[in-house]
Amino acid sequence: MTVISGPSAVGKGTLVKRLQENFPQVWVSVSVTSRAPREGEIDGVHYHFVSEREFDELIAGDGLLEWAQVHGAARYGTPAQPVFQARDAGRKVILEIDLQGARQIRKHLPGARFVFVNPPSWQALLERLARRATESNAEIERRLATAKGELAAAGEFEHSIVNDDLDTALAQLVDLIGLQR
Ligand code: 5GP
């Protein structure tokens, strides 16, 4: 199992998507979230979109491997059962989750591999967030505040890659996970 974390807009999603497209043995967990879908997001593909009440029920039923409230707003969590199924089927399991979630996984599944994705610079991260323009200003401010905290905790991760050139970062990730190119 590989846990991939890093600040918002650092390009984790693109890296994970590329892994998924190129390596059939890779299985990427689909998280549940209580946030509303963004335009173009499909339920069951990008996330399982649930109500706050459904999220409470998942927690109460021990259905989540980890969960966290991210950016002081919505909750996100990893459904446990599909992860164990994929692992037992011999797939390379990838969790793209935030720092709080990574810490919980470290506690429960210490054998996992932890990878932090860094931006080339703070300025580059600001530009990427601004370019995304899917978020309101208040939302961007919140994400920047979270990003500061996440970058400060990068040292907790065994592995660290810099997402400057996408192909280079992808190659590093492929080697870390032990995939055959
Ligand atoms: P977004 O709202 O942009 O899709 O995701 C916001 C943040 O939530 C990202 O930093 C992402 O890593 C994190 N996240 C997504 N799914 C999960 C999850 O299942 N658990 C945790 N702890 N964080 C998640």
Image (cartoon, rainbow, N blue to C red):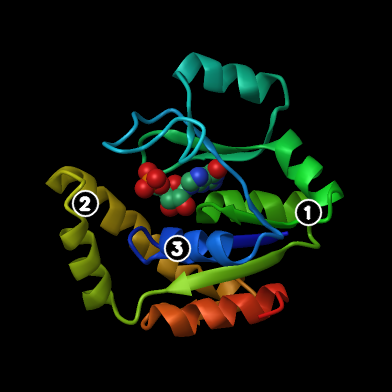
Kind of residue at disc 3: Lys
Residue 10 x/y as whole percent: 36, 66
What numbered label is drawn on residue 83? none
Looking at the rendered structure, the secondary structure element under dot 2 is helix
Looking at the rendered structure, the secondary structure element under dot 3 is helix
**Side (left or right) of 75 relative to 60:** left
For marks 2 and 1, give the CA distance: 32 Å
Residue at x 29%, y 36% (from the top left corner): 38
Residue 5 x/y as whole percent: 52, 61
For label 2, the residue is: 140
**Side (left or right) of 164 relative to 82:** left
Quick one: 146 or 8, which is closer to the camera? 8
Kind of residue at disc 2: Ile
Q: In the rendered view, tell whether residue 128 sits above or below residue 94.
A: below
For marks 2 and 3, give the CA distance: 17 Å
Asked whether mark 2 and ligand 1 are closer than 8 Å, the reply comes as no
Asked whether mark 1 and ligand 1 are closer than 8 Å, the reply comes as no
What numbered label is drawn on residue 12? 3
Please tell me which of labels 1 and 3 falls first in the chain: 3
For label 1, the residue is: 109
Residue at x 40%, y 77% (from the top left corner): 166
**Side (left or right) of 62 relative to 160:** right
- Numbered-mark total: 3
Residue at x 54%, y 61% (from the top left corner): 21
Residue 20 in view, yes or no: yes
